[in-house]
Image: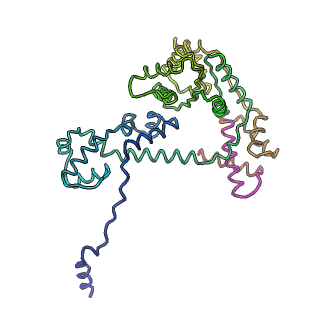
Amino acid sequence: MTGNLAVVEESRPAQDQPKKTEPTPKHEMTLAELKALQEWFFVRKRSIQAISAELGRNKTEVAMIFTEKASVREKILGYYRFLGGDGEPTALQLKNWFEKEKINYPAIEKATGLSKTKISQYFNRQERIDSLLALKKRIEMQEAMPDIATGDFVMTSVAQEVEMVLKLAHLDHTMGMLYGDSGLGKTRAAREYAKKHPGLIFIECKSWSNRITIADELATALRIDRSEGSVAVLLQRAARALKGTGRMLVIDNAHFFKPQVLDDLWGIYDESGCSIVVMGVPKLWDRMSDRNGWRYDQFQSRVGVTRHVLMITGEDVRKWLAANGITDPKIVAEFDKKKNLPGHLRYLSQILTKLKRICDAAKCEPTVKHFEMAVKAVRESFV
């Protein structure tokens, strides 16, 4: 009986056999869609250099995603149809089809006139585009995530000092330097100043920032064509675009810069007369004070206003907590004890975020015990 069943199973018509389902083909992005994606990143101050760093990819490889010519696809697709293929397959589907038909790269090269490199880049474009879309999704999630500890902007003593430096540099058309520990609120204060002065260009540097990324950022802000010319030419165009406008350039995290970028900045200042303020941690001042050559002297001699921002005060903490709905004296006192620990206001913000989430989950008002739980949660997140 078992044998008969086996025979029946083997003789079952092919159409009755379970079919393998192929994954739904991904959309082949057009050049217009890729340009729109690039603009989406640029609006969020993600230059090609920044995107490549976040993806861990070569800058040229990322740039080619946005500049790939439609003719490459047309030639490969034309050969595919000549061989009997139909439809509008994606790059990955084309690659799989050629492999299945045992058509190698030399044959595709000969038929299309494309180099092996261009063919390979096209076949692997979907994986690169997918990584871009994944990065876009991560950024969108970060933007959508509420930061419940931020609250309204509070004019702390640190924020007042930041505003004073920016105002003086702006009014006197000079260069400024402002430095202090991380987490004091320097960046937030500068951003608030920028909101009141729409002409201000604010650039927040990263560890990978260099003269290329600065040129990219300036070109984006000033809507300068980036397609032609060297970095030096692009910086010169930026300086000329700034000349006589009364605009101001504020660069945060300038301690990441190498001497060449500092040379570029004072060059832009000399050419444009535009106010420029650099901000960073005390390392920024240490580098300026280390006079191992003319580079730092040239920059520092143009600085008309300098400020070392120190600590936040107890009054700053009280005002900041009140803006975030915390007025219990016991809780305020606990926060005050930690105001001068590394991270300062940023560290307190992390504690406050955890504290609010703990209390929201428990549906209760915060207590000292909840505060201690929040501190422990922040510490464990760094383990």
Q: Is residue 176 left or right of residue 53?
A: right
Whether residue 358 is in magenta: the answer is yes
The residue drawn where x is 36% and y is 37% is 67
- Quadrant of res 245: top right
Res 268 seen here: yes
Residues 162 and 365: in front is 162
Q: Residue furthest right?
A: 329
> Can you say which quadrant of the picture contains the C terminus?
top right
Question: x, y percentage for residue 188?
Answer: 65, 34
The residue drawn where x is 25% and y is 78% is 12
Q: What kind of secondary structure does the magenta stretch mostly adopt?
A: helix
Magenta segment range? 344-367
Question: x, y percentage for residue 233?
Answer: 42, 20
Residues 33 and 190: in front is 33
Q: Is residue 140 left or right of residue 317?
A: left
- Quadrant of res 362: bottom right
As displayed, is residue 216 above or below residue 361?
A: above
Whether residue 286 is in magenta: the answer is no
Question: x, y percentage for residue 65?
Answer: 37, 40
The residue drawn where x is 74% and y is 29% is 157
Residues 333 and 102: in front is 102
Judging from the image, the colouring scheme is: rainbow
Q: How many marks?
A: 0
Q: Is residue 206 left or right of residue 13?
A: right
Res 181 seen here: no
Q: Is residue 344 left or right of residue 365?
A: left
The residue drawn where x is 52% and y is 29% is 221
Question: x, y percentage for residue 52?
Answer: 43, 37
> Can you say which quadrant of the picture contains the N terminus?
bottom left
